[in-house]
């Protein structure tokens, strides 16, 4: 259910410029933006430019953002790679604080989180911007835009928490684009939500540095992390992402008590090699545990990968079998409504516990966190 996506401010597109800047790793193309008049074109909000967390001042004109592994070094007049941060006189600012470009009420199954409060509603929000460049992005219109290039609704963290409560949402999901890039807004909202008994959900590409990730774990209840592949050359070419950073982040979440589910979009010809899927699922089972749910999601041609065909159902089924053989207990097939791979099965008695069609729950036989047939404990946040 869409709440709103109203226009607040629309500025002329700023001229994209390539300027010399440093990036912490040679893996990624430089893709910074010249901002024109410093901070002047950012939509004005009642929050003002909001000082960022996790950055270092280098000199009066230069800062280095430490939020994600890109570690952008920025000087006056530049917009960050993620389009969400801008420096001014030795300080770094978030330019998306409180500017929501998407606000929806979704079933929690859409996140997807299948082992968290099944059948509940999640208040789901996003700002513009992203620190990745996935060629298959479903939300590229907002993730690959600056805030001044999209329609926005201005909402304070308190207003988000109140709206979530008014709409009977048990959770707030930071989702659609990459929530790491609206870190400060997510943190402030999550703190208020926690005080009001609302759980916080993070759907992320996992490209975040260890310190901010550890900071977040104190506020998050659950996360769905896109582990987009297990091959660095694929991740570099298709997403401009670094595998080791995502694996480190996954372990931090798990070790600090955040419930973790993983999504892997299986893209035909690019990351559908069964050897790599075996390697990935073996890593998950050994490092995060066999009860970590894995969502193998069907790709549909879009954005920059319109030349490919949808993932064959047989490929997803083979990937699921591979993951189960590697020891994972909960392996789902996504984006194929009605497929039996959408259901939750008891790892002990194998009976169907939660029957789903798309985002709809048809049956739930989990009782107090255990199998309603054989009493085996089923991992998740059920209450
Ligand atoms: S969060 Fe944005 S500004 Fe910070 S390092 Fe990553 S891409 Fe650069």
Image (cartoon, grey):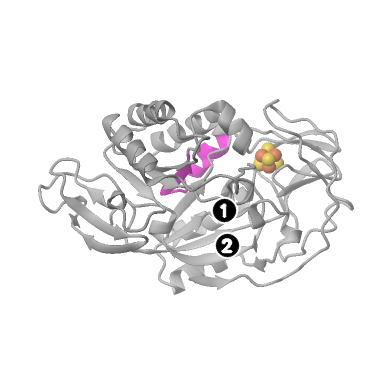
- Rate crowding at label 2 as few (under 14), some (14 to 19) or many (20 or more) other CA atoms within 10 Å: many
Taking the magenta stretch, the answer to whether it contains residue 247 is: no
Quadrant that contains the C terminus: bottom left
* Mark 1 or mark 2, whichever is nearer to me: 1
Find the distance from the CA under tag 1 to the CA under tag 2.
26 Å
Q: Is residue 217 shown above or below 117?
A: above
**Residue nearest the observer in this picture, 310 or 92:** 310
Q: Is mark 1 on a helix, strand or loop?
A: loop
On screen, residue 215 versus residue 47, left or right, reads left
Residue 257, label in figure = none
Quadrant position of ligand 1: top right
* Place of residue 234 in the rendered image (x, y in percent of width and height, measured from the top left): 57, 31
Residue 138, label in figure = 1
* Residue 357 position by quadrant: bottom left
Circles 1 and 2: CB atoms closer than 8 Å: no
Residue at the (55%, 44%) spot, across then down: 308
* Place of residue 210 in the rendered image (x, y in percent of width and height, measured from the top left): 55, 32
**Residue nearest the observer in this picture, 264 or 157:** 264
N-terminal-most mark, 1 or 2: 1
**Residue nearest the observer in this picture, 21 or 325:** 325
Residue 157, label in figure = 2
Q: Is mark 2 on a helix, strand or loop?
A: helix
* Place of residue 178 in the rendered image (x, y in percent of width and height, measured from the top left): 58, 48
* Place of residue 27 in the rendered image (x, y in percent of width and height, measured from the top left): 67, 27
- Rate crowding at label 1 as few (under 14), some (14 to 19) or many (20 or more) other CA atoms within 10 Å: some
The answer to whether residue 356 shows anywhere in this view is: yes
**Residue nearest the observer in this picture, 147 or 339:** 339
Q: In the image as oriented, which residue stretches furthest toward the left?
A: 374
The answer to whether residue 260 shows anywhere in this view is: no
Span highlighted in magenta in the image? 211-226
Taking the magenta stretch, the answer to whether it contains residue 212 is: yes
Q: How many labels does the image show?
A: 2
């Amino acid at each position: 259910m869409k709440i709103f996506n109203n226009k607040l401010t629309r500025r002329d597109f700023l001229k994209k410029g390539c300027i010399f800047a440093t990036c912490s790793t040679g893996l990624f193309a430089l893709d910074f933006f010249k901002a024109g008049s410093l901070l002047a074109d950012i939509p004005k909000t009642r929050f003002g430019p909001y000082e960022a967390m996790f950055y270092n001042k280098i000199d009066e004109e230069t800062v280095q953002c430490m939020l994600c592994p890109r570690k952008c070094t920025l000087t006056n007049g530049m917009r960050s790679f993620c389009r969400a941060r801008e420096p001014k006189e030795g300080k770094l600012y978030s330019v998306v604080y409180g500017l929501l470009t998407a606000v929806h009420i979704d079933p929690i199954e859409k996140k997807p989180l299948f082992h968290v409060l099944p059948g509940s509603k999640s208040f789901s929000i996003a700002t513009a911007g992203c620190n990745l460049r996935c060629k298959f992005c479903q939300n590229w219109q907002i993730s690959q835009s600056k805030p001044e290039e999209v329609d926005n609704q201005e909402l304070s963290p308190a207003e988000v928490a109140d709206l979530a409560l008014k709409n009977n949402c048990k959770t707030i999901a930071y989702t659609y684009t990459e929530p790491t890039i609206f870190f400060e807004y997510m943190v402030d909202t999550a703190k208020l939500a926690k005080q009001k008994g609302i759980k916080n959900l993070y759907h992320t590409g996992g490209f975040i540095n260890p310190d901010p990730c550890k900071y977040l774990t104190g506020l998050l209840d659950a996360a769905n992390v896109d582990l987009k592949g297990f091959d660095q050359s694929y991740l570099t070419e298709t997403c401009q992402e670094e595998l080791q950073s995502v694996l480190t982040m996954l372990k931090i979440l798990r070790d600090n008590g955040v419930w973790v589910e993983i999504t892997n979009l299986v893209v035909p010809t690019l990351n559908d090699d069964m050897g790599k899927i075996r390697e990935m699922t073996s890593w998950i089972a050994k490092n995060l545990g066999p009860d970590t749910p894995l969502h193998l999601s069907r790709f549909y041609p879009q954005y920059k990968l319109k030349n490919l065909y949808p993932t064959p159902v047989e490929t997803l089924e083979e990937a699921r079998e591979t993951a189960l053989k590697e020891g994972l207990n909960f392996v789902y097939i996504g984006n194929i409504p009605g497929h039996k791979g959408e259901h939750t099965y008891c790892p002990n008695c194998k009976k169907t516990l939660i029957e789903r069609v798309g985002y709809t729950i048809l049956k739930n036989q989990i009782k107090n966190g255990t199998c309603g047939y054989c009493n085996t404990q089923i991992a998740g946040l059920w209450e």
